Image (cartoon, rainbow, N blue to C red):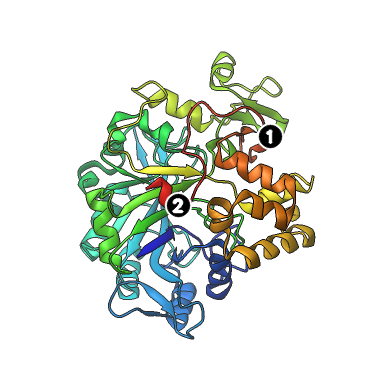
Amino acid sequence: MRLIADLQLHSRFSGATSDKMRVGEISYYAQLKGLNLLGTGDALHPTWLAELEDSLEELEGSGLYVSRSGEYRGIFFIVQTEVATVHELGGKARRIHHVILMPSFEIAHQLRDLLEPYGNIDADGRPVLEITPAELVEIVMATSRDNLVFPAHAWTPWWSIFGAFSGVDRVEECYEDQTKHIHAIETGLSSDPPMNYRCSWLDRYVLLSSSDAHSPYPYRIGREAVVFELRRPSYRELVDAVRRRDKSRIKMTVEVPPEYGKYHWSGHRRCGFGPVSPSEAKKLGYKCPVCGRKLTKGVDDRVEELADREPGYTPPDAIGFIRLLPLQELIAVSLGMGPEAEAKLMSQKVWKQYLKLIEAFGNEFNILLDASIESIREQAGPRLAELIAAMREDRLRFTPGYDGVYGRLMLGEARSEGAKAGGTLDRYY
C-alpha cells in the first residue's frame, strides 16, 4: 500500500500556529493534497492528546489511527511530537529540535510522565526541556523500543542539530552514546538530498522530509513528504523500513526546491539585506553592511562548511526524490499575483481555481505529477499549464530565501542538477 506521509506537524497548541490545526481540518486539507498518513503533532500536550484520543481510534492493532466518526477513513495518523532540548556544550548553549514517533497514545502518556521533571510539558505543544539530546533519546527508547527519534529540520540556523547558531558539527556530538538509536535526519525546507549528499558521514541515515506545518492549508501541509510502499498500514513496518534504510519500502521524498526555503542563503531581514550567496557572505565576514550585526547564516553556507564532497555527488544507494511547489503558489503566480503574501494563497480567486482543479483531477499530487499538461491547460489556461510543465522539467528557478523570508519563484534556465522530470509517482521509483 502506498502511503504519502507528512510525519511532522503541529497542533494549535504550539506557538505561532493556526487555530485551525484540528483533526477535522487537517484531515480535510490532507485529502485535497493527496496525503494519507499524517503525524499528529504535539502528542505530549495534555489538551491536544485528549482531543486526539477522543477523535481517533487505532486501526486493528496497526499502531496507526483513523477517525472514530468514520469520516476521512483513508487518512491515517501516527502518534508524533516535536520537543526542544537546551544544554551546554563547549561553553555554548545548544538548542535542538527532535521529532519523536510513537506506536500508541499509551506510550505518549508514559513519555509525558518521564519528561515532566525536565520542563513544563503543558506550556507549549513543542515543550522545551533542560536535558541533553542523549538523555532525551535514552528516556524515549526506555519508554518503548518501538519509538523512533530523529533531529528535526537539521540545517535551520536556529534550533537544529547543524544550525549555524546553536547546533553542532556531527551527529555524534549531539546524541553521544545514543547515536546508535538515530536512523534518520529530517532535512528541512532549505536543504534537499543533494546538499546532504555532500556530507559522507550522513550516508548511513535516511533523509526524511516533512512540512513542519503550522497551518493545515495545502500550501503548508504536505509541501514536503515521504512516499512509503508497505504491505499494509502499519507503524512498526514503517519504523522498520526507516531503521533498515529499505529502498523497497521508502520510495522517495517530496521536496520543495531548497531555494524556496526561508533560510537557504544568508541575509539580514531587519535591514532588508539579502539574499547573499555563500561566497559573498564570506567576503563580508557574515556582517550586515547596513547595521554591522551578524547575518543570519544560510543553510547553503552551513552545508559548505561541513561538506567533505564536492557538489553533484550522489551515493549509489540514495533514495529518490522529486522537487515540487505547492499548487496554490503556482496558481497565484499564473494569475499574476505572486506568492509573497500568504493571504493571496487563500484568496477567493486562487481557492476557486484550486478547487476546480481538485474536482477535475482528484488531489493536488495528481495535478502536479500525473495530469496531462493539455488537460491542465483546458481546465486552468496556458499560464498554469506552462508553470507545471516547467516544474516537472526542473526549469523553475528562484531568488533564494533568507533570514525568515521565503524564496521567490522566477522562470528561467534549468537547474544544474535535480529530480527527474515529468510523469507519475511511479516513474520516480
| Farthest bottom residue in view | 69
Image position, residue 89 (x, y; %): 34, 36
Mark nearest the camera among 1 and 2 is: 2
Q: Tell me which residue sits at (36%, 40%) in the image.
A: 88
Q: Tell me which residue sits at (64%, 65%) in the image.
A: 360
Q: Is residue 171 visible?
A: yes
- As measured in the structure, the alpha-carbon distance from the residue carrying label 1 to the one carrying label 2 is 25 Å
Using the image as rendered, state which of residue 117 and residue 394 is in the foreground: 394
The image shows residue 224, relative to residue 291, as above or below, that is below
Q: Please, what is the three-letter code of the amino acid marked with disc 1?
A: Met
> Image check: 69 left or right of 284?
left
Using the image as rendered, state which of residue 332 and residue 82 is in the foreground: 332
Image position, residue 266 (x, y; %): 58, 28
Q: SS for tag 2? A: helix
Q: Residues within 10 Å of mark 1 (few under 14, many from 20)?
A: few
Q: Residues within 10 Å of mark 2 (few under 14, many from 20)?
A: some
> Image check: 323 left or right of 85?
right
Q: Is residue 151 visible?
A: no
Marks 1,2: beta carbons within 8 A: no
Residue 175: quadrant of the picture: top left
Image position, residue 178 (x, y; %): 22, 47
Q: Earlier in the sequence, mark 1 or mark 2?
A: 1
Residue with the mark numbered 1 = 410
Q: SS for tag 1? A: strand
Q: Tell me which residue sits at (42%, 57%) in the image.
A: 82
Residue 297: quadrant of the picture: top right
Q: Tell me which residue sits at (69%, 24%) in the image.
A: 291
Image position, residue 140 (x, y; %): 27, 59
The image shows residue 339, relative to residue 268, as above or below, that is below
Q: Quadrant of the N terminus?
A: bottom left
Q: Please, what is the three-letter code of the amino acid marked with disc 2?
A: Leu
Residue with the mark numbered 2 = 425
